[in-house]
Amino acid sequence: MKAVCWHGTNDVQVETVPDPTIINPRDAIIKITTTAICGSDLHLYNGFNPTMKKGDILGHEFMGEIVELGSALKNGMTNRNGQTLSIGDRVVVPFTISCGNCFFCQRDLWSLCDNSNPNAWMAEKMMGHSPSGLFGYSHLTGGYAGGQAEYARVPFADVGLFKIPEGLTDEQVIFLTDIFPTGYMAAENCNIQPGDTVAIWGCGPVGQFAIKSAFLLGAERVIAIDRVPERLQMAQTSGAEVLNFEEIEVGAALKEMTGGRGPDSVIDAVGMEAHGMGLEGFYDKVKQAARLETDRPNVLRQAIVACRKGGTVSVPGVYTGFVDKMPMGAFMNKGLTMKTGQTHVHRYLQPLLEHVQKGNIDPSFVITHQLPLDQAPQAYEIFKQKKDNCIKVVLKPGQAA
């Protein structure tokens, strides 16, 4: 089969690799019909994860058709959502791999599964404990082959596969795999109350879904912060007020817009590669380049300082290691709450599907580019450099160039 393989910093290649096979009785094989490039894939593309190996298959946003089931999974089985699954069914695959049986899965904390990361010892050295395994996202999270390919093996398929009803296109449901639930959980973590103002840093795909989700959950105002004109325009179309951080001092603007109080909650939808301004931005870029700091927390610093007293800091943006110069004095003395984590995708599949079916949201709004899988190297560059007003790229296996 063809697959998108990592070969080093800024180097991905489409190669012919062996087809995946059933390894464990609860595995399934799916033929992929649609896959996507995520902003967090760029962290791997940019070389910020030291546990990647040459030839690793990328991608964690994918969907397709069941073509094979392991021996423990019978045709017509019932999954955890009460759906009947059979060969030929159309399914989406959560990017988090979860067993369904451990302490954390039983508590609806799917991205913290204890049984799905075979390389848990790596994560434990850095983090104390390991999160769940993830598709296509380095050996730190299991070394699983990803879904930017023609086929993929799905472990714990009776827990992970989620059947899509007829009448919905791939483009309407592909983002149930990651960025729609991620944006929704980010907004949900804000504990939004009627009349609340939510400030969101980062108007990439996750930020766009966080904007939509904040309004779905009852926010009165959403203020979106970025520097890319087409992203700000999309945010504005969704009802957000927008700030360009290259043109205005964001902290002062947020105070003025909220009568001096600050936003009720803030969302960092940027993460470890934030673009800082001035001396602070230069400082973080130098430290990250010298490997004296793994992540650039410019946005997180700014969000903590901007948030109102007693407010909530929600962090869906990916961080992988260590940061410094954090305003812990502001965080503690303002009595802030921080909520973070990889998304518990399984928790949100059914309710978010229902939002799509009811017409409350059409997730395809975020797609700006669709290319054949064979053109993945060009797609990565388009996405990274934000060429041609790119916000989100979808790849189609088997589509002619």
Image (tube, helix red, strand yellow):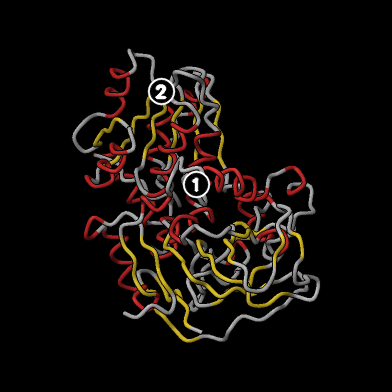
Q: What residue appears at the point 51 percent right and 64 percent down from the top-left corner?
A: 62
In the rendered image of this protein, does residue 93 appear above or below residue 182? Answer: below
Q: Separation of disc 2 and disc 1 at Cα?
A: 22 Å
> Can you give x and y, in whole percent of width and height, for residue 271 in the image?
43, 46
Q: Quadrant of residue 275?
A: top left
Please state which amino acid type lies under the numbered disc 1: Val
SS class of the residue under badge 2?
loop
Category of crowding for the residue at label 2, using alpha-carbon neighbours closer than 10 angstroms: few (below 14), some (14–19), many (at least 20): some
Q: What residue appears at the point 40 percent right and 53 percent down from the top-left corner?
A: 364
Please state which amino acid type lies under the numbered disc 2: Glu
Q: Nearer the viewer, mark 2 or mark 1?
A: 1
Q: Quadrant of the C terminus?
A: bottom left
> Can you give x and y, in whole percent of width and height, for residue 353 in the image?
55, 48
Q: Quadrant of residue 252?
A: top left
Which label sits on residue 356? 1
Q: Which residue is mark 2?
A: 220
Q: What residue appears at the point 41 percent right and 80 percent down from the top-left corner?
A: 14
> Can you give x and y, in whole percent of width and height, for residue 125 in the image?
65, 55
Which residue is the extreme one toward the left?
247
SS class of the residue under badge 1?
helix
In the rendered image of this protein, does residue 58 appear above or below residue 250? Answer: below
In the rendered image of this protein, does residue 42 appear above or below residue 212? Answer: below
Residue 114 or 295: which is nearer the viewer? 114
> Can you give x and y, in whole percent of width and height, for residue 370 in the image?
34, 66
